[in-house]
Image (cartoon, rainbow, N blue to C red):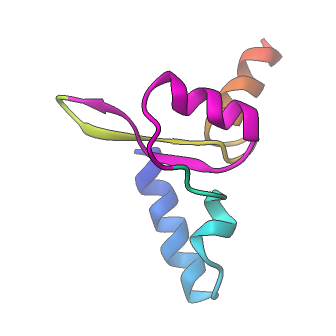
Amino acid sequence: MVYSMIKKQIAKRRKNKIDSENLLGTEYTGLKGQESVNKLLEEKQGHVKSAFSHNDIGDVALIWRDDNIGLQQRLYTKNSI
């Protein structure tokens, strides 16, 4: 769901000539599972398209993003409680 929301934002911003790298940051490839989480925690930016996979929903992307969406948001919310 989050990835589809971001894809919509990307499409909208492409109309304004802003590319997805500016929206999502660097794409890291060849990483899976905890390795993906560790990389984003280290870099504090970017995304991994197929970080996880689930039989019912398929590939799951992991995105750093900001305080409102993505892994950074999860850390912000957890630390705020």
* Residue 67 seen in the figure: no
Query: In the image, is 57 to the left or to the right of 52?
Result: left
* Nearer to us in this view, 10 or 80: 10
Q: Which residues are magenta?
A: 29-54
- Does 52 lie within the magenta span? yes
Single out the residue that lies furthest toward the left: 55
Query: In the image, is 20 to the left or to the right of 22?
Result: left
Seen in the picture, residue 10 relative to 48 is either above or below; the reply is below
Q: Which quarter of the figure has residue 17?
A: bottom right
- Does 33 lie within the magenta span? yes
Residue at the location (58% across, 69% down)? 20
* Nearer to us in this view, 10 or 40: 40
The C terminus: image quadrant: top right
* Residue 81 seen in the figure: yes
How many circles with numbers are drawn on the protein? 0
* Nearer to us in this view, 42 or 14: 42
The N terminus: image quadrant: top left
Residue at the location (53% across, 27% down)? 35
Q: Residue 75 at what x, y percent from top left?
A: 72, 24
Residue at the location (80% across, 16% down)? 79
Q: Residue 38 at what x, y percent from top left?
A: 63, 27
Residue at the location (74% across, 33% down)? 42
Q: Residue 25 at what x, y percent from top left?
A: 66, 58
Query: In the image, is 57 to the left or to the right of 60?
Result: left
Seen in the picture, residue 1 relative to 72 is either above or below; the reply is below
